[in-house]
Image: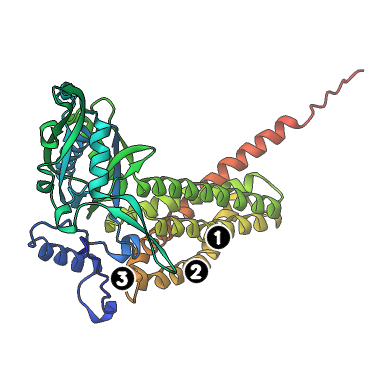
Amino acid sequence: MQPDSISLVIKLPDKEDRKESVNEIGGKMREELRKIPGIDLSVVTSSSVGFSSAKMTSYHIKGDDFNQLLEYSQKAKQILNQVPGDVDVGLSYKAGKPEERLDVDRDMAADMGVSPAAVSDTLYTLYGGVVAGQYETEEDRYDVRVRLKDEQRKNLDSLDGIYIPSSNSGSGGLMMIPLEQVTRKVFTTSSSTINRYDKSREIQLQANYTGISMGTFNNLFMKKLNNELETPKGISIVAGEEQAIMVESAMSMFQSLLLGILFIFLILAAQFESFLDPLVIMFALPLAIIGAVLALFVTGSDLTIVGGIGIIMLFGLVSKNAILLVDFIKQQRGAAVERKEAILNAGLIRLRPILMTTLAMIFGMLPSALAMGTGSEMRQPMAFAIIGGLISSTLLTLLIVPIIYTALDDLRNSASRKKKPKVMANVTD
């Protein structure tokens, strides 16, 4: 049996030895392979989903009526072909090889007095064979199996002239009915495999995408599918494993962000012995996220798992700038310096170390941002997020953190004045 699929793993030269990116080379290969008629194509770059040959997104379309399921899947495939950014759209269903089937005409068989079980037993004897006896030698014993010859079992034409006993009695006793009189030949095709999902027959709708994120691609498809195609009763569509992994990864990343913020706050609260001063420092984190998101948007990069890791790293980097400012302000005020003057001194004196550490980190991320080196294309979103977050947080921290510190310090002073007891003095002559 010849294989019906081919999988090729192509290793590209290092980034320094080629002018085009992985996605550009993959796009050119896709255009060339599309010229071959009758193939279900999938070109997947290692920078997106590793070395897996599976397509980037899939949908499980399931139902009990297979003909209805196949019709709905083909219509859904046409809609998916209209979604911007889609490539390599295909179905997991394959028509399979042609087959010739012998079906019992139950109405005719009932009239002739032939039971479907008798037809089944006869066909099993002719094709599978039945043990009629045993042949013994001095040492061994062999079963004697009676069945049609090999050349007679290649098609159904050899069944012409086969008779089935009838329960109806004729003038001559037992009636024999020709097999072709109570059966009919059906020529069709059958699936090479039967796929099930959640105990139901399923057909997977699969596709790759370019120039668009997975979330946007899925939202566009589901919106277009619900508007243009009515889902029949008994048919349902479920997102594939890729979307489930994406949602699970996003939730894990969100939990990591929350835990990172919580740990930073608790450690700073222990160091400063206060809850208000760490709260001032925490205001630098949203400023970093703004820059990271803007950098990803400007560069056209998606917020991938690697980009999310960059944002988590960014929290530790940008909180350092606010720590330098707030800590120096507290030192100045501890030395009896007025608050406004302490803030100005902190901005002037701490500006140099803030710029030094920030620029060192930015230039350290430039090789990854410029896709220099092997595998750097996958690390680009992380570099963009870190560089953008550092730039925005450095510029805005010097302005926003002093303002927040002043506002919270006024709030703290106001609360302290309210807690002080009032002293009443009575003066008498």
> Which residue carries the number 2 mark?
357
In the foreground, 53 or 159: 159
> Which residue carries the number 1 mark?
320
Choose top left, top right, bottom left or bottom right for residue 117. Answer: top left
> Which residue carries the number 3 mark?
370
What's the residue type where badge 3 is placed?
A: Leu
Q: Which numbered marker is on residue 350?
A: none
Answer with mark 3 or mark 1, whichever residue precedes in sequence.
1
Spot occupied by residue 222 in the image (x, y as percentages of width and height): 26, 37
What's the residue type where badge 2 is placed?
A: Thr
Residue plotted at (65% across, 50% down): 266
Choose top left, top right, bottom left or bottom right for residue 63. Answer: top left
Spot occupied by residue 149 in the image (x, y as percentages of width and height): 19, 56
- CB contact under 8 Å: marks 3 and 1: no
- Label 3 environment density (alpha carbons within 10 Å; few <14, some 14–19, many ≥20): some
Classify residue 209 as left or right of residue 402. Answer: left
Task: Give me the C-alpha separation between circle 2 and circle 1.
Answer: 9 Å
- Observer-side mark, 3 or 2, equals 3
Spot occupied by residue 346 in the image (x, y as percentages of width and height): 56, 59
Q: Which residue is farthest right?
A: 429
Provide the secondary structure element on which disc 3 rests: loop
In the foreground, 233 or 125: 125
- CB contact under 8 Å: marks 2 and 1: yes
Classify residue 240 as left or right of residue 2. Answer: right
Task: Give me the C-alpha separation between circle 3 and circle 1.
Answer: 26 Å
